Amino acid sequence: MIRVLLADDQALVRGAFALLVNSTDGMQVVGEAGTGDEAVTLTRDLRPDVILMDIRMPRTDGIEATRQIVADGGSSDSKVLILTTFETDANVLRGLRAGACGFLPKDTRPDALLDAIRTIAAGEALLSSGATRAVITRALSRPEAPAPERLASLTAREHEVLRLVAAGLSNQEIADELVVSPLTAKTHVGRILAKMGARDRVHLVIAAYEAGLL
């Protein structure tokens, strides 16, 4: 069972998300927070698997709440998926640096949102196309950084997989693209994460662009 915490200052939004999640097999809403402070406290008390986090909330915003949740060793297993109508370059990068595992707009299709929750709960990370563009735009606005030594440790196949990860493809999509099994794709991604010293797929995207790989 994937345990979900909803953090949004609008009760109607929380209600809609709760209805969607609770009507889905294998998922359950375990708590709701209307402020960032409440999200931090409930995460510590309830230990949800995934937190659907809004950015604009009273007192403590969603990004600061995410930072506190990730920094709290007692709740570090909880994964944050930011849902927002403000998918700007600054918000995306602030959220990623705070430790969010994913970033989606609030108008994401219900089935795509449920898939995203499953992906985050499984320990992977994801970015919407808009969030990916924000990372790219910010990376390209700076002088190209030299490729780190860790990048040189990747095999030719791993370079190829990294490019596909940075393009936003899932393990299944990478497997289809390379005509390999999903398990093989997952193994490649795991090795790349280890070699790059990256926490998750989101940070592989950042590393790929900051290194000038793409």
Image: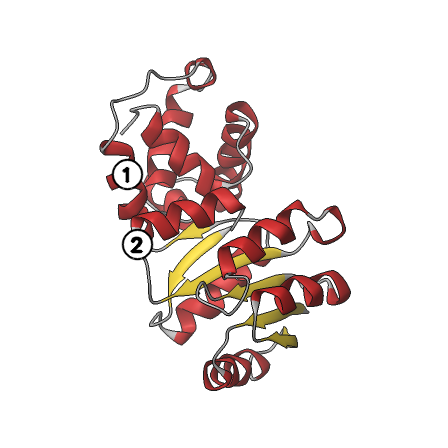
**Residue 88 disc label:** 2
Identify which residue is drawn at 37% across, 20% down. 156
Instruction: Indicate whether 148 appears above or below 111.
Output: above
Q: Quadrant of residue 18?
A: bottom right
Identify which residue is drawn at 23% across, 32% down. 140
Identify which residue is drawn at 51% across, 64% down. 53
Q: Position of residue 86 (x, y in %)?
A: 33, 62
Q: Position of residue 212 (x, y in %)?
A: 29, 24
Spatial separation of the CA atoms under disc 1 and disc 2 = 10 Å
Q: Please indicate whether residue 91 sits to the left or right of residue 10 in the image.
A: left
57 and 7: which one is in front? 57
Q: Please indicate whether residue 135 sits to the left or right of residue 199 in the image.
A: left
Amino acid type of the residue tagged 1 in the rendering: Arg
Amino acid type of the residue tagged 2 in the rendering: Thr
Coloration mode = secondary structure
Instruction: Indicate whether 109 appears above or below 196.
Output: below
**Residue 138 disc label:** 1
